[in-house]
């Protein structure tokens, strides 16, 4: 099964025939794979195409009792959610909370209360609209596929047994969260903005305190009572997920399958901490992003592709072909691999299926893995098929969005695009975070995050005027193309490039101006000039004149790749560098940070605030120079991609703003509360983690200009 194992029938080219696997003793973790069976290798799965594989991506099977060949095979995904967690797929649901106190920050004191009353007959599948599930009318309930049967809703599949018969157990696919309906059509890859994951998890039998065995297990292991967890889950609401405590229930389910792999403990959440709901992101933009996750925790610039090639023990071109990664641009291949890593790692958690976690750990250098296992595991999760389906859905979305613009709105959309690309809409502090040191600093061997200026001609605490397109643009790939056939996607070089060495430019060019030692050091290290400060007589005021001027010296540029309206740049929450973004976010907004809810991803306990980390500081991310040190806060956020924006409400990373029009208002005028979903949930922005402050860009536009900008944004 080496290279392309279980590949889809619609693949255009057959991967090269592999050499025999290396003779090697399996590692301890890899030995666990002896109990794993790839669902796509079963007789009834033969001939599956990309669409079937992606739709039915329920993961592999394992022995119910590890190491016992007489034990039945079960799909761990479906068995976990149905038999172990006990989601109420067809069981009546009765949940009653009246002013139930909830501790949001883990300090032992209630911070808010939750009131919800949910009474439904027949459970989740009998009431899909209440749970925000997307109906699949062209794939009705009970229709048998290759390895699963339809439940009639997107993202939930009934696993077939190994003999091809229905099992009665239901598992999840990626489309449960990353899929939904828009404009009368169902798309895989848009955010599941109506899906109430917290409510779904709250139906789990394992959280019922009347379940004596489950309650006793929780007490024995020091877990919070089920009622406490249910109340916390119900605070997330539709289109959002709570990333702390019991996201996916995780380690609180007795007998979960992936416990057999020790690496599981590293990625499973604990049971205490800050309640931190974030919006479910779309994944249509993934091929164009250099960073994954809101906090950019996954970075395509890491050595993952080199690790994969080393583990596969084959020439690079064969590895790219075998894993069906792009062969013509290493940057595109790195991003595709990053998507696979996120896919397998996440499904390893959600499917309670350790092979996905093992594979990700191996690429990240945490586990050894044989070449055969390295090749076989991605096929178990239809990794390449899911990636291709997302790319196809992206193209379908773009075509539909373009066709949906009426002729009467064309002028408004054009004006909005001009505002997006040309109008100054606010200021930000001159700080950005690199997860890894830029290539210019490879010799310095810097570890961990690096702080750098956005404009290397200005000090770190300078305020930079910004246009929408300065942050929401593109992240170029690696292949170099002629600039004439590869122009900046939003019209200007200065959407990305703010500083330039003075010497190659025509004279006279004013040297960078500044005060103090920091400015002097920048002058010594390259005599930089701000490109934006160049006078219009050097290049005219229009975008075309700017590009023509730059093209006089720079005839080529890296391929801009797919425009996903994100620079993949990381911005610090702690804009003033005092380490107290979570405790004093208003100060960081005043300092020029984007200022949105700072609880994202970094749930620093109250007792540890203000919290800082020691990082390297560089003066210019493009040209090597001296390296300093600084203490900064631990929170940052990636410039969000804007693909499928009209299907992504509510907005900001925590879903705290209901409409694009509200996002263009000052925070003080945004709605404090608004309803979400069909089950009576009301999002309260006054609750910790739900703050709707920050990102006050474009608030000074006129009402007509705001409408034009929204008209453009809704075409993305």
Image (cartoon, grey):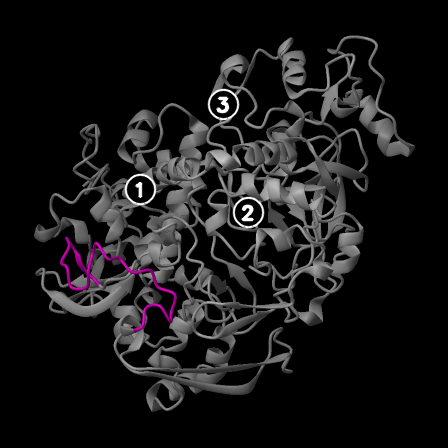
Residue 296 disc label: 2
Residue assigned mark 3: 559
- Separation of residues labelled 3 and 2 (CA atoms): 22 Å
Magenta segment's dominant SS is: loop
Q: Residue 203 vs residue 597: left or right?
A: left
Question: Which tag, 3 or 2, sits closer to the chain's start?
Answer: 2
Q: Secondary structure at mark 3?
A: loop
Is 139 one of the magenta-colored residues? Answer: yes
Is 569 one of the magenta-colored residues? Answer: no
Q: Give, as a single range, the part of the protein colored magenta.
A: 127-150
Observer-nearest of 419 and 695: 419
Q: Secondary structure at mark 2?
A: loop
* Place of residue 24 in the rendered image (x, y in percent of width and height, measured from the top left): 25, 43
* Place of residue 468 in the rendered image (x, y in percent of width and height, measured from the top left): 64, 38
Residue positioned most to the front: 408
> The N terminus lies in which quarter of the figure?
top left
Residue 367 disc label: none
């Amino acid at each position: 099964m080496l290279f392309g194992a279980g590949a889809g029938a619609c693949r255009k080219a057959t991967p090269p025939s592999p050499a025999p696997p290396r003779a090697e003793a399996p590692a301890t973790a890899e030995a666990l794979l002896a109990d794993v069976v790839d669902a796509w290798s079963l007789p009834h799965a033969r001939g599956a195409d990309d669409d079937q594989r992606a739709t039915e991506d329920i993961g592999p099977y394992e022995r119910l009792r590890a190491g016992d060949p007489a034990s039945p095979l079960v799909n761990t995904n479906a068995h976990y959610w149905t038999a172990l967690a006990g989601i109420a797929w067809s069981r009546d649901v009765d949940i009653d909370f009246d002013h139930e106190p909830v501790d949001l920050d883990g300090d032992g004191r209630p911070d808010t209360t939750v009131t919800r009353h949910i009474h439904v007959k027949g459970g989740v599948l009998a009431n899909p609209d209440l749970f925000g599930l997307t109906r699949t009318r062209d794939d009705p309930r009970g229709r048998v596929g290759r390895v699963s049967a339809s439940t009639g809703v997107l993202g939930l599949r009934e696993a077939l047994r190994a003999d091809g018969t229905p099992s009665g157990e239901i598992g999840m696919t990626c489309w449960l969260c990353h899929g939904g309906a828009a404009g009368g059509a169902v798309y895989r890859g848009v955010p599941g903005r109506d899906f109430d994951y917290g409510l779904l998890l709250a139906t789990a039998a394992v959280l019922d305190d009347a379940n004596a065995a489950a309650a006793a297990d929780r007490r024995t292991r020091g877990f919070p009572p089920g009622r406490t967890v249910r109340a916390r889950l119900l605070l997330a609401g539709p289109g959002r997920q709570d990333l702390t405590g019991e996201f996916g229930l995780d380690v609180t389910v007795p007998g979960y399958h992936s416990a057999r792999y020790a690496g599981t403990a590293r990625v499973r959440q604990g049971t205490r901490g800050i309640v931190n709901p974030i919006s479910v992101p779309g994944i249509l933009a993934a091929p164009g992003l250099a960073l994954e996750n809101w906090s950019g925790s996954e970075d395509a610039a890491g050595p993952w592709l080199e690790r994969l090639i080393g583990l596969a023990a084959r020439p690079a071109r064969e590895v790219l072909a075998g894993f069906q990664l792009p062969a013509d641009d290493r940057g595109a291949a790195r991003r595709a691999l990053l998507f696979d890593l996120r896919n397998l790692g996440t499904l390893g958690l959600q499917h309670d299926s350790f092979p996905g976690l093992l594979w990700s750990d191996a690429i990240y250098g945490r586990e050894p893995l044989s070449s055969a296992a390295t090749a076989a595991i991605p096929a178990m999760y239809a990794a390449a098929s899911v990636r291709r389906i997302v790319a196809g859905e992206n193209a379908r979305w773009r075509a539909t969005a373009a066709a949906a613009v009426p002729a009467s709105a064309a002028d408004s959309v054009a004006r909005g695009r001009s505002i997006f690309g040309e109008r100054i809409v606010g200021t930000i502090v001159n700080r950005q975070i690199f997860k890894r040191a830029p290539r210019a600093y490879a010799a310095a061997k810097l570890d961990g995050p690096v702080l750098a200026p956005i404009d290397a001609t200005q000090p770190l605490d300078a305020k930079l005027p910004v246009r929408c397109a300065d942050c929401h643009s593109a992240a170029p790939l690696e292949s170099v193309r002629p600039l004439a056939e590869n122009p900046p996607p939003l019209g200007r070089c200065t959407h990305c490039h703010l500083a330039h060495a003075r010497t190659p430019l025509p004279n006279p060019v004013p040297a960078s101006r500044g005060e103090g030692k920091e400015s002097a050091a920048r002058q010594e290290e390259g005599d930089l000039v701000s490109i934006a400060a160049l006078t219009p007589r050097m290049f005219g005021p229009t975008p075309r004149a700017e590009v023509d001027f730059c093209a006089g010296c720079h005839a080529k540029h890296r391929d801009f790749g797919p425009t996903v309206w994100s620079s993949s740049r990381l911005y610090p929450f702690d804009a003033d560098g005092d380490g107290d973004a979570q405790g004093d976010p208003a100060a960081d907004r005043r300092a020029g940070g984007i200022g949105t809810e700072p609880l994202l991803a970094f749930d620093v306990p109250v007792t540890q605030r203000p919290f800082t980390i020691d990082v390297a500081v560089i003066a210019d991310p493009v040209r090597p120079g001296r390296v300093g040190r600084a203490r900064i806060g631990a929170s940052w956020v990636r410039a969000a991609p804007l693909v499928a924006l009209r299907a992504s409400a509510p907005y900001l990373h925590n879903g705290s703003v209901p409409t694009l029009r509200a996002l263009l208002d000052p925070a003080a005028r945004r709605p404090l509360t608004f309803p979400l979903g069909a089950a009576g949930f009301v999002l309260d922005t006054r609750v910790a983690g739900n703050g709707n402050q920050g990102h006050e860009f474009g608030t000074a536009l006129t009402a007509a200009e705001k409408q034009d900008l929204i008209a453009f944004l809704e075409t993305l």
